[in-house]
Image: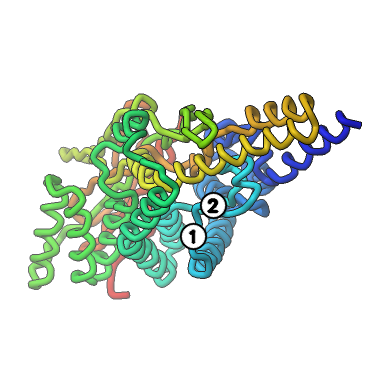
Amino acid sequence: MLVRNGVALLLAMVLLSGCATRSLFQPYPSQARAWTADMAAEGPAPLLRKGVDSRDGVLYLQELGRVRQLSGAIEDSESAFRRAFGHYDETDAAARLRASSLVSNTGALLVNDNARPYVAPDYERIFAHAYQALNYWRENDVTATAVELRAAANEQRVAANRRDDEIAAAQEAARDEGVQPADFDSHFAGLDAAAGEVKASFQNAWTFYLSALFWEAHGEYNDALVDYKKALEIHPDSAMLQEDVARLSRAQDGRVERDKGLVAVVYEQGLVPARRELSLPIPTPHGLFAVAFPTYSAADKPRPAPLTVAVDDTTARTEVLTDVGGLAARHLREQLPGMLVRQTLRATTKYNLQKKANDDFGPVGAILTQIFNVVSEQADLRSWLSLPAYAQATRLMLPPGEHRLQLSTPGGGASLTVPVVEQGVTVIHVVATPGRLITRVLPVQEGPL
């Protein structure tokens, strides 16, 4: 009877973990290898669809939208991203109704953060809207493209407005619980190194650049100049962005370059690094308790590698506009105070549960809860893993007509013919995935909206 009661207790705890069980026994990065190995293949889609109705559905929808876009299934990609946007709206509405999101439910407090429904961070939401804009751009749906580009810009604006308040609220909660985040800084030095020069997790110059190209093509020079300037604020030393700002300033004055069209390459290199697990001793009223944290390592980040574009006697190289791994690491760093609060509360709860099991069920209960505590102490390693490591761009001014471009990267190259229209904008979307270089020439944008 004692053993049966102990087993019942353990089963109850596992049931409390709910949707966390999948991540508990198969960490998310291990799951993601099934689709990141060849994102342009058809195989990953059924696997991802199995997860879209779970509590982590928004994460699987983002992954599905991305891999279907790369495989050329644009309608599927659009549908997945639209569903993801619905999740964003639900998350925002729920956030307005609750006072704090630091601890969401009993299962999360007892098990680990994998039991919390996945909430897409700002940098993922911004990319999702940018990718949806690329979907509509590919279909030459000008109105829908404009809507999504404005949505991506709005996500950055909203994130900037709420970021300081969220960080302050987490720090206040840490003080209330007697948690000193600064005491753990030395353990997260690798996280700071992975974030690099990224100052805020929502600053995405690549999406601003994509938007600026679109507005410029349609003669919306004021909007284009605003977005070029925003990208330049993030990368003030970029000669390319400085030249773009100067060109648009001239265009505002009516000095538009004739007999030329703009060819831009928006390039995505590699894959964003996955989170790693870090075990730390957390002090509780009953002593130290080992808990698992997610982190990033700078060693996992690939080196930026530009794409070279050659046409006739002209050569251009892409430059990094967004360090996506840096955004992910900076986001995690911003979440650390709240994470420390949850882990401290969780450690205390697990200790008390173990003590109660020992009191109520004797040694068997204590052993079972010890086993559960060890098995369930898994870091939350969930993040959108089909994103690139770096988002880059370059552009050339070419005479009207068709031009043969040579694209080359350290991992391979491609050759393609692109149309150039006077005062129009031709955008080439290039994605370097493991073992493959995917290229898409988007419809030329020109004339008023």
Is disc 1 surrounded by few (<14), some (14 to 19) or many (20+) residues within 10 Å? few
Q: Does 362 sit above or below residue 171? A: above
Left or right: 201, with 351 as reference point: left
Distance from label 2 to label 1 (Cα)?
7 Å
Q: Amino acid at mark 2?
A: Val
Q: How is the image coloured?
A: rainbow
Residue drawn at x 56%, y 39% as measured from the top left: 348
Residue farthest to the bottom, as pictured: 449
Percent x, y of residue 56: 60, 50
Work out which quarter of the rendered image holds the C terminus and state it: bottom left
Percent x, y of residue 372: 69, 31
Is disc 2 surrounded by few (<14), some (14 to 19) or many (20+) residues within 10 Å? some
* Front residue of this view, candidates 190 and 440: 190
SS type, badge 2: loop
Residue farthest to the right, as pictured: 1
Percent x, y of residue 132: 46, 59
Residue drawn at x 81%, y 33% as measured from the top left: 6
Residue 103 is tagged as 2
Residue drawn at x 63%, y 45% as measured from the top left: 48
Q: Amino acid at mark 1?
A: Ser
* Front residue of this view, candidates 402 and 104: 104
Picture quadrant where residue 376 is located: top right
Q: Which residue is mark 1?
A: 100
Residue drawn at x 37%, y 27% as measured from the top left: 411
Q: Does 211 sit above or below residue 65? A: below
